[in-house]
Image (cartoon, rainbow, N blue to C red):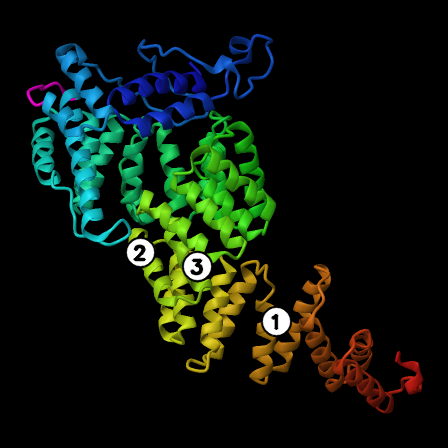
């Protein structure tokens, strides 16, 4: 059996098992990867042509036959036993409990299964209790502090669940799904070391539960933690590592993993979206835009990840495209956090910041842990000059994810606006540690060093150099390096950076005051060092401008006439 057939067979069985245990997020993920595997045209298309996404031929009936395990060509793989189902033992009770669960009546579902001892029933009972506790916690948070406020509310089911699941694990009567739930409970209780151990046991026993992998990833915050995991060599491990690398800001390694996975999952929208996410972090906005356009053609009602697409359109100031996207998600599902975030970006680009904040707050009412909404709302408050509110929004963002460099950068901006450069520098340092390849962060830190309170120009120069080496698309670093070296009395270094900045402006066909400044300095520098022919070139270029620099160029040319063997130059030789 080849790699594609192996993955396809495993995912079909996993999809049924995950759905049967009400793990619908994991089930959806498995289904998306199942149809993302390229089909055999000879088998699955009536005209023997290449498989097309969206074709009715992708509809499959689940087959419950056992998987014939064999090493898969091109994919890392070990045999994983298929779970034995036990619904015959207490099937009627389980079906009733599952019906209650699907209706969000979690306590009733748990009550129905109170005397059932089969592993599947135990898992659903415990899972229902966990979600009942989460539901009550959310209600208490709204009652006590409001939908966006902080609260000390906790899931009151965690203690009893931890006790029961720990006993089951010690007795060896817990299945991989129970281990997943136990790991989730331990994580929420703050016992992350044991949670990692338990979640590794879960994914090694049953690797197709993507929610277990996701929870494991969330508590692997360093590459050392990731490397220490003793994971079986199953193909699902590649998905996990690709996602983990992305969260650890190892974007090139993540891209390599996803490109490798595309060899089998050629039509996976999930992989395409993750590749777009990695390229977004690398600021390859043009490529990200192409990927999302393709995703929307293949999945026109997709809302997931579209908030990232809206960020790209916002950064590129594509007003019409962002307007179309906002209308599209509004008509698809206007009460998704992503939809509210996209509409908020649309109003922000229009300059309607109050309305933008309203939609970001709506997104947070739907999901108070929606990181992008907190960060973007902070940006809007900065635009509105409401720095206390901006600081509060950014702090909420870093509480949710301390690795969000945008929120740390926002905090730095807010404190800089308040005239507190020492605080601003502290937060800029945090942001640049998390995203060292972003030139904007280095520039912000350099500008902080330049303030009157700090005036650490050598440190500013170091930051501008890092920015220049990080593809400074705003073309700020080179010019500032030249100015700082000039201010510190280093004309040779200043000339070097002015020349590099001038070359860049010429390549990009940009004009402006920076070019005039560079030409004027280089003309004066070359004249001082008796490189009169080179100085004449810069002066001649300055004659094309209007303003005082033109008169200065004329005066320099006249001065050089008397200093050199140039032909006599009278005033009439200069353009008026």
- Whole-angstrom CA distance, mark 3 to mark 2, is 13 Å
Pick whichever, 329 or 413, lies toward us. Answer: 329
- Whole-angstrom CA distance, mark 3 to mark 1, is 27 Å
Q: Nearer the viewer, mark 1 or mark 2?
A: 2
Where does the magenta region start and end?
A: 113-119
Q: Are the two marked residues, 3 and 2, in contact with CB atoms closer than 8 angstroms? A: no
- Image quadrant holding the N terminus, namely top left
- State whether residue 345 is above or below residue 104: below
Q: Position of residue 421 (x, y in %)?
A: 40, 75
Report whether 536 appears left or right of 400. Answer: right
- State whether residue 130 is above or below residue 442: above
Kind of element beneath mark 3: helix
Tell me if mark 3 has few (under 14), some (14-19) or many (20+) residues whose alpha carbon lies within 10 angstroms of its own.
many
- Residue located 10% across and 34% down the image: 166
- Residue 499 in magenta stretch: no
What's the mark number on residue 479?
1
Evaluate whether residue 284 shows in this view. Answer: no
- State whether residue 460 is above or below residue 280: below
- Residue located 16% across and 12% down the image: 92
Q: Which residue is mark 3?
A: 379
Kind of element beneath mark 2: helix
User: Number of marks in the image?
Assistant: 3
Q: Which residue is mark 2?
A: 396
Q: Position of residue 285 (x, y in %)?
A: 56, 47
């Amino acid at each position: 059996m080849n790699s594609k057939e192996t993955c396809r067979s495993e995912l079909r069985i996993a999809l049924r098992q995950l759905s049967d245990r009400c793990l619908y997020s994991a089930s959806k993920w498995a289904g998306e990867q199942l149809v993302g595997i390229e089909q055999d045209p000879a088998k699955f298309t009536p005209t023997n042509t290449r498989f097309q996404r969206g074709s009715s031929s992708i509809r499959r009936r689940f087959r419950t036959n056992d998987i014939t395990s064999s090493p898969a060509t091109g994919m890392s793989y070990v045999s994983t036993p298929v779970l034995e189902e036990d619904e015959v033992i207490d099937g009627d009770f389980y079906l009733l409990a599952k019906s209650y669960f699907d209706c969000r009546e979690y306590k009733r579902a748990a009550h129905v299964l109170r005397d059932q001892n089969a592993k599947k029933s135990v898992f659903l009972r415990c899972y229902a209790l966990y979600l009942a506790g989460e539901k009550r916690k959310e209600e208490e948070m709204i009652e006590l502090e409001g939908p966006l406020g902080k609260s000390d509310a906790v899931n009151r089911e965690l203690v009893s669940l931890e006790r029961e699941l720990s006993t089951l694990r010690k007795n060896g009567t817990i299945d991989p799904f129970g281990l997943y739930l136990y790991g989730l409970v331990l994580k929420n209780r703050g016992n992350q070391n044991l949670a990692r151990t338990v979640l590794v046991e879960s994914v090694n026993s049953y690797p197709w539960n993507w929610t277990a992998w996701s929870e494991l990833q969330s508590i692997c915050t360093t590459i050392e933690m990731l490397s220490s995991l003793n994971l079986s060599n199953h193909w699902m491990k590649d998905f996990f590592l690709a996602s983990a690398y992305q969260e650890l800001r190892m974007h090139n390694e993540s891209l390599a993993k996803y490109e490798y996975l595309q060899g089998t999952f050629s039509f996976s929208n999930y992989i395409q979206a993750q590749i777009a996410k990695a390229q977004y972090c690398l600021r390859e906005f043009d490529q990200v835009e192409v990927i999302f356009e393709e995703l929307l053609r293949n999945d026109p009602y997709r809302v997931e990840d579209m908030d990232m697409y809206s960020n790209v359109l916002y950064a590129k100031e594509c007003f019409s495209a962002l307007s179309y996207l906002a209308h599209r998600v509004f008509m698809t599902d206007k009460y998704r956090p992503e939809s509210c975030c996209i509409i908020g970006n649309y109003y922000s680009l229009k300059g309607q910041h109050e309305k933008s904040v309203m939609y970001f707050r709506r997104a947070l009412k739907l999901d108070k842990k929606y990181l992008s909404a907190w960060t973007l709302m902070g940006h809007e408050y900065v635009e509105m000059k409401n720095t206390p509110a901006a600081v509060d929004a950014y702090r909420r963002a870093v509480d949710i994810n301390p690795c969000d460099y945008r929120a740390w950068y926002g905090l730095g901006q807010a404190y800089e606006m308040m005239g507190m450069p020492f605080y601003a520098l502290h937060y800029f340092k945090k942001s640049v540690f998390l995203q060292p390849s972003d030139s904007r962060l280095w520039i912000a830190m350099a500008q902080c060093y330049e303030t009157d309170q700090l005036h650490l120009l050598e440190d500013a120069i170091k930051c501008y150099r890092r920015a220049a080496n990080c593809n400074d698309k705003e073309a700020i670093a080179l010019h500032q390096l030249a100015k700082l070296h000039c201010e510190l009395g280093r004309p040779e270094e200043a000339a070097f950076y002015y020349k590099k900045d001038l070359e860049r402006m010429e390549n990009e066909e940009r004009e402006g005051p920076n070019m005039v400044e560079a030409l004027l300095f280089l003309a004066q520098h070359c004249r001082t060092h008796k490189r009169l022919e080179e100085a004449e070139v810069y002066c001649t270029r300055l004659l094309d401008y209007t303003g005082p620099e033109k008169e200065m160029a004329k005066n320099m040319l006249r001065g050089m006439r008397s200093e050199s063997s140039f032909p006599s130059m009278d005033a009439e030789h200069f353009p008026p």
